[in-house]
Amino acid sequence: MTETPNPNIVDADTLTGEMRPIRRVVLSIGSNLGDSMSSLQGAVDAIADTPDVWVTSVSPVYETEPVNCPPGSQNFLNAVLLLDTTLAANRLLERALAVEDAYARERTDVANAPRTLDVDLIVVGDRRSDTETLQLPHPRAAERAFVLKPWFDLEPDAELPGHGPIGELLAKIGVEGLILREDLVLDVE
């Protein structure tokens, strides 16, 4: 028997004519000011509470040495989230910035300044963007072990578009300065 759609139920996509594919997203989170673990857990919770976003995996937490940060910067706690979403990349970026703001992220002119929370879009499906506000894939992800190693833990066969397999990228740059923090675990509710 073939099921006929109920004509009394209106599909929101039918109203707008908009097709919204599900995209796989790699999101990197980090913190080196305040209660970093609390900020990371808050980011996971806020992203998971976002409509049309489904957190599918959370990496282990790594303690990492600051990269290109001002002298005296403390070590970071970093992790990677894998998501599925129907949100457009720009909307997801807006959400990431709002989550940072909720955790008192201060934006200054100092490059790589210490921060309470950093939420970076690394990959959004196969979307490519090179605008002032949105660069996809993330332009420095291929050089950052604190992104590649947690991502590799979740998806060892993944590829960074335009750069190749993350396992090969990680082998090139190494994992010096990364410490797996088995005592710290991020939960997804």
Image (cartoon, helix red, strand yellow):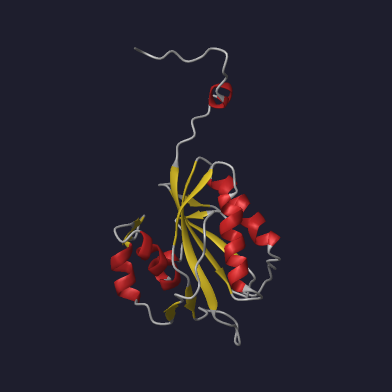
- Give x and y (percent) for residue 117: 62, 67
Most extreme residue toward the bottom, as rendered? 72
90 relative to 105, above or below: above
Q: Residue at x 31, y 74 (%)?
A: 172
Residue 76, image quadrant: bottom right
Horizontal side, residue 145 vs residue 88: left or right: left
Horizontal side, residue 180 vs residue 156: left or right: right
Between 97 and 38, the residue placed more toward the observer is 38
Q: Residue at x 31, y 61 (%)?
A: 156
Q: Which residue is drawn at 61% across and 54% down?
A: 46
- Give x and y (percent) for residue 150: 41, 67
Between 134 and 24, the residue placed more toward the observer is 24
Please identify the quadrant where the N terminus is shown. Answer: top left
120 relative to 70, above or below: above
- Give x and y (percent) for residue 105: 68, 66
- Give x and y (percent) for residue 168: 28, 67
Horizontal side, residue 1 vs residue 131: left or right: left
Q: Is residue 133 visible?
A: no
Q: Residue at x 51, y 14 (%)?
A: 6
Residue 82, image quadrant: bottom left
